[in-house]
Structures are given as structure tokens and as C-alpha cells.
Amino acid sequence: MTSKEFIKERLKVKLLAFPNAELSVFDKAKKKYIGLFNPEEMEFVNDKPDVLMFLTGGSEHVAIESVQEFRFYILLASRDANSWAAATEVKAWMNQHNIRSILLDADHPDTSELLSEYYHAFVGVKRLHGQRLGVVGSPSPWLVASGINPYLLQSKLGIEQIDISWDNIVFDEIQQVASDFYSLFSKAENKQELMESGRIYEGLASLIPFYRLNAMTVECFPMVNKTGHTACLALSKLNYDGIPTACEADVCSAAAMMFAAEVCNTIPWMANIAHVGEGKGLLAHCTAPVNHLTSFKLDTHFETGKGYAISGQLKGEEVTIFRFDSMLNKIFVTKAKVVSIPKSRKACRTQVEVELSQTAIKYFTENPFGNHHMVLPGNWTKRLELAAQLLSIEVVS
């Protein structure tokens, strides 16, 4: 991705002890636990905390007076001075009052890493607010389970939907295509077809400054059927440029791509669930971001046999697969081991076969949220789950 200007946010940490505790209790705790955090990512506060650190027993009332309903908090405690006992009582009270939280051992060696994951999730969720998603055309008619009400999109994620007509782009008037587009797809044999793909890229890219967009999703099939040219390379290049861009005007997938782009600083690959069986899943699509591929070639678009599409080999031995439901109430998240890179002519051109857990297989076969799922090379499960909890989205894993 291109570099971003990160929001200069800090986690607000409140130290909790019994009333009238001496200042030395707090000073010792700061010295002992400051190493849990990156100093540039946190600050100690008295009001409106994000993290509650219990130092002693008797701190329960101070804690519950510091929190707000419907928010999410990290609770830290240790085996010392009844701090864990106090945190347990407060955790139970928070559960009773719809205040979501997780309780962590401040002395566990993994806690510092988890707090770092939480910080990035925390900042990423904040960056989503105020972003604008351009929907070019209308959602493809087969997306019967993937529509998201624009009000929900804004109220849950802070994303504003901007509807855009294809008529707003006059491709025939585009004569210049950026050199980096040609260089990225320099192996193309049909230079005229590459030029047509480049025009589509330039036309879509021109919408970004005009509508002040942070992301797009594009209804591409009508254009393919009308002109014989695909948007696959254009969408791949836009994702490569750092602009989350989904196809089929799928708003649910675009929202998930925007979510991952901010929380993980990586735009995922939007893929079809092409098959699930015998403990494995096949994912495939024609618009994989080339920065997620070790190598790729250009092929025809699978469904139409027209234009250009991406046929590549996904990086890494492990992936994270995730997707929102259409109400933005739930997110499915799982990690999976890559077992092969198929090259079937009966599926979209970039393909990956993964080994799935039994719970993931049950999700896909009994209660899937829809077809399209997002794929990120590597294991991003914890950060995605923490970000979902910040947004009051239930994690199905």
C-alpha cells in the first residue's frame, strides 16, 4: 500500500488502586508496566480511559465510575495485591451492563504483543470514520445476501456511500494512460486490450479526487458485456495503489476491504468461495491485487472469456479469511493453511486451495454470510477480532 498519514492517537490507560492509595503505588506500577506499551502509543490518564489497569483490590468503584456503556475496554491485572480479584468483579459488572471487555494478565509474556494489536485495531477503526465509498453502477443481481443499508454502513462503520453512474465516465475521451499501469502489466501480449484496460483504470481513478473517495466498488459485468473489455486489471491496480476496490458493486465486500485496509494496513483479496469439501476450501477471483502475488500472468476473464484478468500465485503458506454479514452485526474470521495453487479453467483465474478447520467448514456449509470472502496473506485474526469488538460486531470464528 501507499503510505498513509496515521491518526496520532494514544491509548488512554488509567491506573486503579484502593481509595487514598499512596502515590508510590502508582509510581511503582508505571515503572513496572510501562514496557507493556510503546510509549508513543499510550498515555496515563484519569478520565475517559481505553485501558483499565488494576493495581490493588478495593478499586472496583473507581473502575466502574470510569467507563461508559456500549464501549469496549481492555482490563489488565496481575496476581499481586488482589488486583485480579478486583478486575474479575468489575468484569462481571461490565458484562451485566452491556460494557464489553477482555481481561488480560499484565505479567504474561504475550500481553505486550496483544496490546500492540489492540492499538492498531483501535486506531484503524477511528480512521474509518468519515471515509467515502463510491458505488459505481448497481450491485450485481446475484448478490442476494450482500446488500448493506447505507444508514447501517455509516452508523456502524462511519462510512458514507456515494452512488455514481457509469455515465459519469467517458472512456473514449481518455487518451493517456499512466506509465506505471503499463509497466505493471508489461507482459501483456495484446497491447490494444491493455490500452482499453488502462482507459478503464484512468476513468475509475478520476472519480477518486472528484468525489473525494477513499474506496470504490464497481459493477463491471454490464461494461464487459457491452464493450468486451474488463475492469479486472483496473481494480487490481487500484488496490495496488492503496485504494480498496471491490467488484460487482458489492458494498459488503468493499466495507470489509476498507476495514482491513485501516486495521491491518493491507488491502485484502476479494474472492469467491468456489468449493468447500473434504476439509478444504477453494477460493478464486480475477482481480487479485498483484502485491499479494509472487508471480502472475494475464488471462481472459473467466465468466465471459473476454478482456484481461489476473492469474497469479498467492504469497505465503497461511491466510486469514473473513467477511461481514449484511447487517454488520457479525464477522466471520478464520486462519487457514494454503495447500495448493490450482489452475483450473472452471473457476476465476487466481485460485488458492486451503485447509479449513471443522468449525470453518460448518460455517461455510451451514451458515455462510454470503459468497465473497476477503483473503489476507498471513495471520491477522487477533487484530481483526479486536477491531470488530471495538465496533460491537460479534466475532464468529
Image: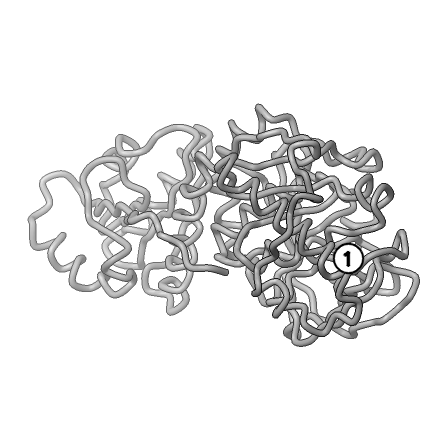
- The figure's colour scheme reads one colour
Q: Nearer the viewer, residue 298 or 57?
A: 298
Quarter residue 38 falls in: bottom left
Q: Residue at x 61, y 50 (%)?
A: 202
* Image coords of residue 280 (percent x, y): 82, 65
Q: x and y percent of residue 44 in the render?
A: 19, 48
Q: Quick one: which residue is furthest to the top in this view?
A: 151
- Which amino acid, mark 1? His
Q: Is 31 on the left-hand or right-hand side of 323? A: left
Percent x, y of residue 338: 72, 71
Residue at left offset 69%, top offset 70%: 314
Looking at this rendering, what residue extends furthest in the right direction?
Answer: 346
Q: With respect to residue 70, does 74 lie above or below? A: below
On screen, 279 above or below 22? below
Q: Secondary structure at mark 1?
A: strand
Q: Residue at x 57, y 65 (%)?
A: 180
Question: Total number of numbered labels?
Answer: 1
Label 1 belongs to which residue?
A: 285
Label 1 crowd (10 A; few <14 / some 14-19 / many >=20): many
Q: Is residue 321 visible?
A: no
Viewer-proximal residue, 124 or 235?
Answer: 235
Q: Residue at x 23, y 60 (%)?
A: 39
Q: Where's residue 106, x and y in %? A: 32, 59
Q: Is residue 378 left or right of residue 356?
A: left
Q: In the picture shown, does residue 61 fall above or below 312?
A: above
Q: Is residue 119 left or right of residue 246?
A: left
